[in-house]
Image (tube, rainbow, N blue to C red):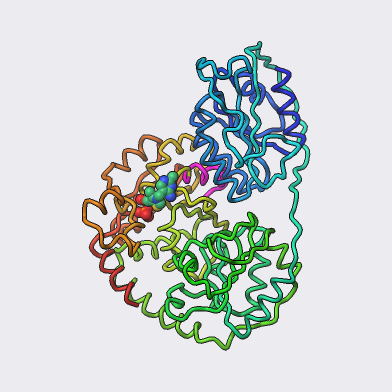
């Protein structure tokens, strides 16, 4: 009992107020202790992978630590995907794992695995060494002692992250030269605290911006926002990246265009490219504040003219293919403005949202999980990040949803009023159809990659007590009525219309 209590006390004093417990025999003492704590938020889940992602979602919302408490054995390994995601997105996710005492190690005794350094360099292993900007793993060896059960008061301290220092000199030089070479700004996912700073900076700078929806500023930048298609043949001289790695194709293609100078400002300090580029490691807002007001370098820019012409053609295409996937995403994006938050799951919905979603009204609280680009744990992260929010919207692919089928078991612990989970069921991983490389493959080869499926998502919705609405044409939105229970919308785009849309889009 004492070692359990000591660990929890130390953690709470360092600012950890939230715990997700996943019960087992080895961690029973920890679970019992946390369940009797006053002053802590304690959630409960039976499945460790989802629990760890749920905890990650909590850190995304609160910017405070959240710990998942698991038993020994493979239960610890289940947390690995969320730990990796937290590492790349710099989130204070904590894993507390119960372990069998040293004498059991290497014996093959039940539920005894080598779990001490299981997360390798992805997690710190001592609270004292932890900067708070990446995961922490505390592995506690426990004897089977008597479990105590009194109520107790937790003492929660404040959480401190160790911040990096940075220089703005190279950044200044980069922008000054931009007047002659043309600058494009690419904005990936931004923390909500950075958004205002980035918005004012870009308004002042006045250059074209490719803004991911999870930047949270795509809808408010007005004419500055352009499609990445604008730069297909007219390459910019420089790219300034702000925030997480951008989702679109253009960023990936920068790897093959070394003549474009790139500077990234991001929390994890990783370039996101395998070629030479500059990186400033810090919260974006802090760097921009340190920089001050930039000199405007925009306005005299043909890219804006090209962008407006493209937008007119795009709207025509969407109008003439209303039941295609982009057509339905456009309409969905209008309905989603009624939500209080918006979580975008995997890549294709994000890319479609970026190109085709409405831009007149901003979305409150846009989020995504893009650190490692996994399709796992997306629903769980969404539920964690929006646990107390009414009218929370999430949009996911079908394989992404099937990956996280146990996530809705958390619905009984979260706010469900007006909650809407949209699954774009295009029957498999259709992002792969967008890859030019795969176009030349045979049908069986393509099928092996796309992984078509025909499961009944209505049964999934009913299993977890969700309401259900199928949308396969624009008119079906008329039946949209969010209520007290979570509504699962299965959106099934017209496959032929979608194909025609993409064909026409590819030649624009
Ligand atoms: C854990 C994990 N496994 C595999 C992948 C590779 N992957 C990327 S997108 C994708 C398909 C996603 O399909 P779906 O959710 O149906 O979305 P769609 O592309 O059709 O929008 C896969 C398998 C990944 N990113 N993460």
Please identify the quarter of the rendering in which residue 471 is found. bottom left
Placement of 244 over or under 202, stated as above or below: above
**What's the residue at 69%, 22% (across, down)?**
4
Placement of 45 over or under 416, stated as above or below: above
- Count up the numbered dots: 0
Residue that protrudes farthest toward the bottom in the picture: 300
**Left or right: 507 in relation to 65:** left
Residue 373, given in percent of the width and then of the height, sits at 48, 52
**What's the residue at 28%, 56% (across, down)?**
472
**What's the residue at 54%, 48% (across, down)?**
390
- The stretch of residues the image draws in magenta is 378-392
Placement of 500 over or under 349, stated as above or below: below
Which quadrant is the C terminus positioned in? Answer: bottom left
As rendered, which of 230 and 239 lies closer to the eye?
239
Residue 11, given in percent of the width and then of the height, sits at 72, 33
As rendered, which of 13 and 116 lies closer to the eye?
116
**Left or right: 242 in relation to 496:** right
**Left or right: 438 in relation to 42:** left
Residue 282, given in percent of the width and then of the height, sits at 69, 58
**What's the residue at 57%, 76% (across, down)?**
238
Which quadrant is the N terminus positioned in? Answer: top right
**Left or right: 128 in relation to 455:** right
Residue that protrudes farthest toward the top in the picture: 146
Placement of 203 over or under 103, stated as above or below: below
As rendered, which of 45 and 433 lies closer to the eye?
433
Residue that protrudes farthest toward the left in the picture: 443
Q: Is residue 425 magenta?
A: no
Residue 163, given in percent of the width and then of the height, sits at 75, 53
């Amino acid at each position: 009992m004492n070692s359990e209590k000591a660990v929890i006390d130390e953690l709470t004093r360092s600012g950890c107020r939230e715990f997700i417990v996943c019960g087992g025999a080895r961690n029973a003492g920890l679970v019992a202790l946390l369940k009797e704590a006053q002053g802590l938020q304690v959630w409960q889940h039976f499945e460790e992978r989802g629990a760890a992602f749920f905890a990650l979602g909590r850190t995304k919302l609160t910017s405070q630590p959240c710990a998942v408490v698991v038993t020994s054995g493979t239960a610890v390994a289940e947390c690995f995907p969320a730990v990796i995601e937290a590492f790349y997105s710099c989130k204070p996710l904590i894993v507390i794992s119960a372990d069998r005492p040293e004498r059991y190690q290497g014996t093959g005794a039940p539920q005894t695995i080598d779990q001490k350094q299981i997360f390798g360099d992805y997690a710190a292993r001592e609270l004292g060494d932890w900067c708070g900007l990446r995961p922490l793993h505390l592995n506690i060896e426990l004897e089977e002692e008597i479990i105590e059960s009194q109520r107790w008061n937790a003492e929660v301290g404040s959480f401190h992250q160790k911040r990096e220092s940075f220089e703005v000199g190279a950044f200044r030089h980069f922008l000054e030269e931009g007047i002659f070479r043309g600058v494009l700004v690419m904005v990936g996912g931004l923390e909500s605290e950075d958004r205002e700073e980035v918005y004012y900076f870009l308004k002042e700078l006045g250059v074209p911006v490719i803004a991911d929806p999870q930047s949270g500023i795509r809808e408010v930048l007005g004419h500055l926002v352009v499609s990445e298609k604008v730069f297909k043949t007219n390459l910019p001289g420089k790219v300034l990246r702000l925030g997480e790695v951008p989702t679109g194709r253009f960023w990936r293609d920068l790897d093959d265009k070394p003549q474009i100078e790139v500077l990234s400002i991001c929390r994890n300090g990783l370039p996101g490219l395998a070629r030479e580029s500059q990186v400033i490691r810090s919260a974006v807002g802090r760097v921009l504040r340190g920089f001050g007001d930039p000199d405007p370098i925009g306005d005299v820019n043909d890219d804006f003219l090209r962008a407006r012409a493209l937008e007119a053609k795009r709207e025509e295409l969407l109008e003439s293919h209303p039941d295609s996937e982009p057509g339905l995403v456009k309409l969905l994006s209008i309905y989603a403005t009624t939500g209080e938050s918006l979580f975008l799951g995997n890549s294709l919905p994000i890319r479609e949202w970026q190109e085709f979603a409405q831009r007149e009204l901003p979305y409150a609280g846009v989020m995504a999980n893009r650190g490692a680009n996994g399709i796992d744990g997306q629903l769980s992260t969404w539920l964690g990040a929006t646990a107390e929010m009414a009218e929370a919207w999430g949009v996911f692919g079908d394989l992404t949803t099937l990956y996280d089928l146990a996530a809705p078991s958390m619905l009984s612990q979260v706010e469900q009023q007006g909650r809407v989970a949209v699954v774009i069921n295009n029957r498999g991983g259709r992002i792969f159809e967008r890859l030019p490389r795969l176009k030349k493959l045979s049908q069986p080869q393509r099928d092996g990659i796309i992984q078509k499926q025909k499961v009944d998502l209505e049964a999934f919705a009913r299993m977890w007590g969700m309401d259900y609405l199928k949308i396969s044409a624009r008119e079906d939105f008329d039946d949209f009525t969010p209520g007290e229970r979570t509504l699962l919308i299965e959106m099934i785009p017209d496959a032929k219309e979608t194909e025609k849309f993409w064909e026409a889009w590819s030649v624009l």
